[in-house]
Amino acid sequence: MVTIRNDSRYPTREIKKLVRQTLGYQDITSGISVVVCHHVKKTGLGQERTWMGGYYDVRRRTIVAKIVVPGLEPYRYVPYTRKRGTCPSFDLADWREQLVALVAHEAKHHVQRPGPYVEADADLAAYRAVTYYREDTR
Ligand SMILES: [Zn+2]
């Protein structure tokens, strides 16, 4: 079973569909949980700062994907390792592509269990997933 919890401000239906689709690119159909949420910090001026990021909790077999809150520009995907011949840095068009990239990266770490956890391969998985997603939604 794949358990998906949406603690973000985006619609649960769409979150679930995107997560399942992304896991599907790596043939993951069970044995994992995914939590989608925001990382928000209030600044001293009462504004919100938010950024994307994720991690994979090996012990709990859980991916946590933090995407930016609605109304804020998505980030570029910047690979963990910036060596020549590895994953390029690429633009993420919206929160959906952010989610796809983050889940694909962390799902690769799930597949890499029990290690070694190769960041370059996880970044490539993110890049591929976003490419597939664009092809699938065109
Ligand atoms: Zn990683």
Image (cartoon, rainbow, N blue to C red):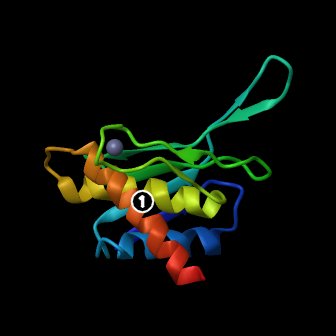
The picture quadrant for ligand 1 comes to top left
Residue 24 left/right relative to 93:
left
The spot of residue 137 in percent (x, y) is 58, 81
Say what amino acid the circle numbered 1 marks.
Tyr
Residue at the farthest front position: 84
Relative to the observer, which residue lies in front, 132 or 114?
A: 132
The spot of residue 58 in percent (x, y) is 26, 47
Instruction: Please report the residue visible at 66 percent of the width from the left and 59 percent of the height from the top.
Output: 94
Quadrant containing the C terminus in the rendered view: bottom right
Residue 86 left/right relative to 49:
left
Vertical arrangement, residue 88 with respect to residue 30, above or below = above
Residue at the farthest right position: 45
Residue 45 left/right relative to 94:
right
Residue under label 1, please give it.
127
Instruction: Please report the residue visible at 17 percent of the width from the left and 52 percent of the height from the top.
Output: 113
The kind of secondary structure element at disc 1 is helix
